[in-house]
Image: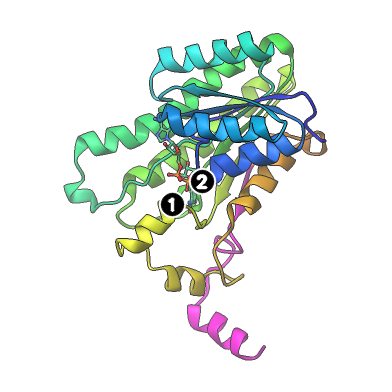
Amino acid sequence: MRLKDRVAIVTGSARGIGESIANRFAEEGAKIVINGIDLPAAQAVAERLTKEGKQAIALKADVSVKTEVQAMVKAAVDKFGRVDILVNNAGMSVVGASQDLEEAVWRKGIDVMLTGAFLCCQAAGKEMIKQRFGKIVNIASINGIGAYPERACYCSAKAGVIALTKVLACEWAHYNINVNAVAPGAVETDMVKNLVAFGILPKDEVVRRTPMGRMASTLEIADTVVFLVSEESRFIEGQTIAVDGGWTAYEYLESWLDKARQKD
Ligand code: NAD
């Protein structure tokens, strides 16, 4: 019970990585706000957790809309009395050749993944500053570290999230607030399954290029987030931890990995 009675908001937590983070937080004793744009889906997760004896509520908010974010944080404080943990997980895939990418598509991706993370940090951060305690984890991506063709919006948003993490960490460290980020590699979620199904993400090649030879599970991302919001990580500030099976560490030929695996 590393998070006993901590109050946590996890954005975009009705499915995928966010749901897994919410599950792990609840197992560790936290009270959880399940957030999403689809209220029934968020309610289904909150109800399941409640049936399991955990404390959870569902709050609808589009993270890119300031008034909705402020209302979500207020409702969390009204219900649970405080906000100790914020995980900015809400996100979406944005893929397209840069020369043809619609401005509206670009703006939507930046609005949700970068501006949304900022608005949530701002609203929850005010509570954390009052409390002189807080833990924020932003879900970035390895796409915010390296360049991925036809993902200019997604890469820019996630690189922005990594920069935001560093700035807020430095601004708020003296309030006893830790701000860090996790940069997952490819994770087996609906988002990735759809990209694979539509031929946008070549799963076999991704697995081949990953030193650990597979994609991540949502639990592997969630376990890292639990560490970053727990007492054990109290002196980690402004960092981005890649949870990618070695992807960002590896810069050599794929054929070397093939040969190394054949020797096994
Ligand atoms: P997902 O699509 O399964 O879940 C994303 C959730 O965010 C959904 O529930 C969606 O409804 C919600 N959401 C979208 N827009 C929102 C908004 N405006 N306000 C509130 N909620 C909103 O995706 P996932 O794979 O679980 O990804 C979660 C996060 O992890 C995202 O930020 C994504 O960019 C990041 N990530 C995923 C992978 C991967 O391989 N799956 C890799 C690296 C980073």
Query: In the rendered view, how is the structure colored?
Result: rainbow
Residue 48, x across and y down, in percent: 60, 35
Q: Quadrant of residue 132?
A: top right
- The residue tagged 2 is 16
Residue 208 at what x, y percent from top left?
Answer: 50, 75
User: Given contact means CB atoms under 8 Å apart, are the residues at marks 1 and 2 in contact?
Assistant: yes
Measure how far apart labels 1 and 2 are at the Cα level.
7 Å
Q: Residue at x 56, y 12 (%)?
A: 75
Callout 2: SS:
helix
Where does residue 210 sit, x and y in percent of width and height?
54, 69
> Residue at left 67%, top 13%?
129
Q: Residue at image x 52%, y 74%?
A: 252
Disc 1 residue lies near ligand 1 with CB under 8 A? yes
Above or below for 235 versus 97: above
Q: Residues within 10 Å of mark 2 (few under 14, many from 20)?
A: some
Judge: label 2 CB < 8 Å from ligand 1: yes
Magenta stretch encompasses residue 248 = yes
Q: Which mark is residue 243?
A: none
- Residue 148 appearing in the image: no
Q: Secondary structure at mark 1?
A: helix
**Boundaries of the magenta span:** 240-264
Is residue 249 found inside the magenta-colored segment of the image?
A: yes
Observer-nearest residue: 47 or 55? 47
Q: Where residue 190 is drawn, which disc sits there? A: 1
In this rendering, is residue 242 above or below 87? below
